[in-house]
Image (cartoon, grey):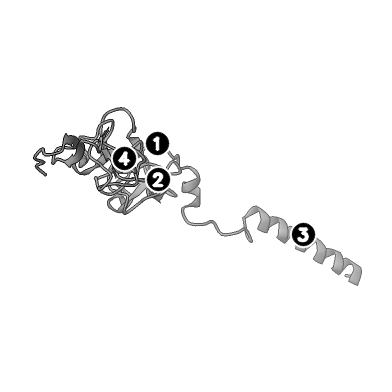
Amino acid sequence: MTIRQKALCFVVSSAAIALVASACGVGDEPETPGSAQAALSVCGNNTTEPGEECDGTNQECNYMNGEYCGSDCLCHNSCGNGLCEWNETFASCPADCPFDDREKVGQAALSVCGNNTTEPGEQCDGTDQECDYMNGEYCGSDCMCHNGCGNGVCNWNENFESCPADCPNPNACGEEICDPSWQFCCDHWLAPTCQPYGTYCQN
């Protein structure tokens, strides 16, 4: 056999070997374990399958510490999802529960301020009765209790002496203005009232 014939045989043999190797899968990338099954998984069928951490329930996540099952069938931390969950408070997750921790705030994100119903996360709603109103607190537009002194209004329980910021008139007495020629401000335990001089004032 000539050198040319030998070279031709070598080329043909190499091509045949490569063709057989390709047909048998020799040299292909190894399959990741479980990847074939994971590709067949269906998120949302309430069955946890390969490639999923959960499906349809939080039980498979660390839900006692705030994890929940997301729409991608993976476990996520609930703080930051925009809902004040049952196990979150202002102290543990202010991003989802932006309310004062004076009250328990589970589900506070669902509360509606201004509907005259005090709901989780609110201290009051539409009335001062739920605040310490006898000592000057009032219910603000944020449904939280605030100190009345400093709100710019001389309230029924304030006078010049107790809150000069709101009652700058020296004769201011709750919602009244006393006539200094014959009246004084009696800071009664119920409310400041203008009384004639000589009247006994029981504080």
Mark-to-mark CA distance, 1 and 4: 31 Å
> Quadrant location of the N terminus?
bottom right
Read off the residue under disc 4: 108
Viewer-side residue, 133 vs 123: 133
Which residue is rendered at x = 16% and y = 35% of the image? Answer: 195
**In the rendering, which numbered label is found on residue 15?**
3
Dot 3 or dot 4: first in sequence order is 3
Query: Residue 6's x, y, as percent?
Result: 85, 69
Q: For the residue marked with disc 3, what is the amino acid?
A: Ala
Query: Residue 172's x, y, as percent?
Result: 28, 39
Q: Which callout, 3 or 4, points to the residue nearer the camera?
A: 4
Callout 2: 10 Å neighbours few (<14), some, many (20+)? some
Viewer-side residue, 179 vs 95: 179
Which quadrant of the figure has residue 45? top left
Q: Are marks 3 and 1 in contact (CB under 8 Å)?
A: no
Q: Which callout, 3 or 1, points to the residue nearer the camera?
A: 1
